[in-house]
Image: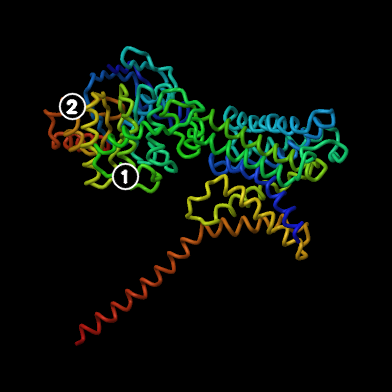
Amino acid sequence: MNSLIITSIEQGLIFAVLAMGIFITYKILDMADLSVEGTFPFGAFIFAKLVSTGVNPFVSTILAFGIGSLAGLMTAVLFIKLKIKPLLAGILTMTTLYSINLRINGKSNIPLFNFESVFDIGPALLILVVTVMAIKITLDQFLKTEIGYLLIATGDNESLVKSLGANSNKFKTIGLMLSNGLIAFSGALMAQYQGFADISMGTGIIVIGLASIIIGDTIKKDSSIFNSTTRAILGAIIYKIIGGIAIDLGLSPNDLKAISAIIVIIFIAYNNLASDFLASIKNKGEKKYANNTRIIEKVLQRH
Amino acid sequence: MLTIQGLSKKFYKGTENEIEVFNNFNLYIEENKCTAIIGPNGCGKSTLLNILAGSILPDSGRIILNGEDISNLSEENRSRLIGRVYQDPSMGVSPSLTILENMSLADKKGEKFTLRRLVKKNTIDKYVEILKSLDLGLEHKLNTKVKYLSGGQRQSLSLIMATMKHPDLLLLDEHTAALDPKTSYIIMEKTKELIDKYKITTIMISHNMKDAIRYSDRIIMLNKGKIVLDKPSKNTAEEELIEIYRTKLFEQIA
């Protein structure tokens, strides 16, 4: 059980990097970027290629971020320059990456057990905690800069960004590149952690990222102690722990993707419908009350 | 100050729905004056504002502001010269950011945005001073997200943000139309105060004849892209404007 929890936390931390990447597009830019599903294995395959040609694993992981961000650039060009809708632009990038991923190493599964990895230098948990904290702090600080605030304003109100004399498309591009870079970085970490890169490792990954963000948002909803990046990290860890426990209790790992989809549906439906539902209860109550008043008035008239 | 020369604009060009809004339209706006543009829906007043701001490109014509031809400047490049307040109070602010963050952004308008921290402690006093002059108590809500403010408070903030860097030209796009009469009055008074204080040349669009007369120096009425009335506001009576509306409307129906 103990090792299950630790494994879940470790995997959760890897997905935390993914969740922070998705947070930038989904929450800040208010855009569903589906290229994620291609970018995650893209990072893994870039890492595999580099490390197998003798590049240091740390350098390879960082390069996965840099090269991965080019996937975001592609989506940005499709979306901004060619005016393709963001959803379709992401799908086109994802589909293109599928072929690119197979091209990078020439096959769909690359074992990495014989190569160095960033986890060689110490306990995986410690390395992951340090890495995730470093990314979180950097991202938090970035969002407090002038450019960071313009990124937030771009998702919020594009005409304001233009009225400030800035080009909102530039900030969409920055956001998409940053997001895809982090997702590729996460993919590179995952490849090293599980010991192989596989073409199917991106399937359903956007749902995991969204589930993490949504779960993170519901923790102490109205408290300002946790900022958005902390919530994304905690959400990813909780998601993985729930998944780990579910499998431990006998759930087939094959069902896990459907379960994550259901978690996302339930949480979003709850957020969308809860207020309507409460309002309808309240309305019914008021109608009852109004009815009572009418009866009382009638009674009073008679007397 | 502002010269519009030979402006032409058609929408849905080449289709059977083609609409000609302007054909060789000319207008000169004097410095430090507030010009109110009124007219029925579809007369071209919103299109004119959008063309001035650069969010719609004209088919032909030149726009010269303070001697500089801005016809080919993009919307974001014009914004260092032009401030704009929209009808929707949320259009001029970033709702998920706080008042302080919004004002800090507006304070950087037209400058280069870098990797330095946006919110600086030493500017807070200045913002508090500006907010105090509004008299809406916003100076106590610096760290409140703008989406939690009322429409009137948000519009006041938009107004402050649009005028903070003293633009050469201020465009008011029916900026009190979505507010209740009392709030609308407060915002109009504040607007007047700000444009007098900073001497900003202003063009306002309004459907409210009273406001248009009271707060402007010059009234222009447009109909089908043509100027049908152009006179000093102080010589204009509300009845006169309504009469023109009535006769024009009659013509259009007939």
Other-residue count near label 1 (Cα within 10 Å), few / some / many at <14 / 14–19 / ≥20: few
Is residue A121 or residue A34 the one in the foreground? A121
Quadrant placement of the C terminus of chain B = top left
Residue A290 position, x and y percent, is 32, 74
Q: Residues within 10 Å of mark 2 (few under 14, many from 20)?
A: some
State the SS at label 2: loop
Residue A254 on image: x %, y %: 78, 57
Residue B46 point in image, percent of width and height: 34, 32
Q: Residue at x 74, y 30 (%)?
A: A59
What residue is drawn where x is 61% and y is 28%? A77
Taking depth in this image into account, of B239 and A60 the one nearest to the observer is: A60
Distance of mark 1 from mark 2, alpha carbons? Answer: 35 Å
Residue at figure coordinates x 69%, y 50% from the top left: A12
Q: Are marks 1 and 2 on the same chain?
A: yes
- Of residues B20 and B207, the one nearer the viewer is B207
Give the amino acid type for the residue marked by disc 1 in the picture.
His
Checking the image for residue B140, the label placed there is: 1
Q: Amino acid at mark 2?
A: Asp
- Identify the secondary structure beneath mark 1: helix
Furthest-right residue in this view:
A114
Q: Which residue is mark 2?
A: B217
- From the viewer's perspective, is A208 left or right of B201? right
- Location of residue A154 with respect to B145 vertically, above or below: above
Q: To which chain does the residue with label 2 belong? A: B
A68 on left or right of B225:
right
Quarter-of-image position of residue A31 = top right
Horizontally, residue B208 falls left or right of residue A287, namely: left
